[in-house]
Amino acid sequence: MADELIPTWEDVARRYGRKIYNFAYRLTGNPDDAADLVQDVLLRVRKGLASYTPGSFEGWLWRITRNAFLDGVRRKKRRPTSPLPDDDRAPIGASPSPDEVLAAVRLSDDVQEALLKLPLEFRECVVLCDVVGLTYEEIATAVEAPVGTVRSRIHRGRKLLRGMLTWPV
Amino acid sequence: MAGMNAGSCDIGVLLSAYLDGELRAGELERVAEHLGDCPDCVLEFRMLKEARAAMRLLPLLEAPEWLLDEALHLGPELSAYLDGELMTAEIPDVVGHLTVCARCRDDLLELDSARVAIRALPRVEPPEFLDVARVARSSPTRSRWRLATAAAGIAAAVVLTLGVATRPVPEQTVDLNSFADRHVARASVEAGFSMLPVLAPGPVTP
């Protein structure tokens, strides 16, 4: 891909800022952590664009994003603040609200909560696939794993997620 | 949830990829054919479809405005640019941004003013009583000589004191409060006198 047009970092911020924020929010479940991650990623992009060699830009960008996320997780592990809920047995969303709007909010809260209980490697693949909308090939580049592994992680992640949700979708 | 346990079929792992249109040609027919025969895999496929639908229920959130606004402008690079501390690879990017972004140019001017103001601060002379020059001149050899002289002086003083010890000496006390007051008064009227520890002046020149 010799004639790939490399975007400027301003383009990246405009075009991908919201997507990166959503990726970060779904992975962390926390707006502050998501904002920190977006700042970190865009700074890394700004510094890294000069050395980017044309190839899969999406794969490159999401690898940076994912690495920034993992660095954040490692930092948090050294200084744990609020642990994730550890009661995996309790079913989530057993009684959805009858009100449609509230129900929609509740449903997405339930999905978010279930998502946070997925092992990290499953969670990131599912989010990159279903929230960010990457292909398996792009996800493989982002998480630095073979496509077969990505396929398996998405599959197992979805199975686990569905098992945690008791309401009909 | 029988479908969730359809472990006996090796096709199970392909079902998500089937759902996402990520199967290769040979696999596609194999899965489609298998789904016609295996109720367990049909159930599992439905569950996976529901999981994907659940994920897609998640609304696409707006990132906070300040966050993207901040991301579109230069930050610490501006000071590094002023100080000639940018990495070579960063320079074209920063300069390129400055040519098109009025806000960053304004920020740069403000930072430059602050930098100039800081650098224009007058050089502070150490207070006279420190006699920095004399301390700097003193060599280890001289110090040893002084130490020997001081020791001899102390010995002589001890002998002298012992010699006059029989005479009554009026008691002398030091009033700490008045000593502190005098010190504060001096600090407030004498320029260059400070009660704070005096640090070696830096290389800053106006």
Image (tube, helix red, strand yellow):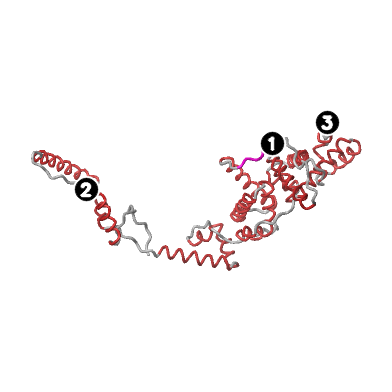
What residue would you read off at disc 1?
A87
- Secondary structure under badge 3? loop
- Where's the N terminus of chain A, which quadrant? bottom right
Distance CA(mark 2)–CA(mark 1): 70 Å
Residue placed most toward the observer, B105 or A97: A97
**Crowding near pointer 3: few (<14 within 10 Å), some, many (20+)?**
few
Residue placed most toward the observer, B89 or A103: A103
- Secondary structure under badge 1? loop
Q: Which residues are magenta?
A: A82-88
Q: Which numbered tag is attached to residue B8? A: 3
Give the quadrant of residue B64: bottom right
Q: Nearer the viewer, mark 1 or mark 3?
A: 1
What residue would you read off at disc 2?
B174
Say whether mark 2 and mark 3 are on the same chain: yes
**Residue visible at 65% across and 53% down in the picture:** A53
Mark 3 / mark 2, whichever is N-terminal: 3
On what subunit does the disc labeled 1 rest?
A
Disc 2 marks a residue whose amino acid type is: Val
Q: Is residue A104 visible?
A: yes
Image location of residue B3, percent across then percent down? 84, 36
Q: Is residue A55 visible?
A: no
Q: Which numbered tag is attached to residue A36? A: none
Q: Nearer the viewer, mark 3 or mark 2?
A: 2
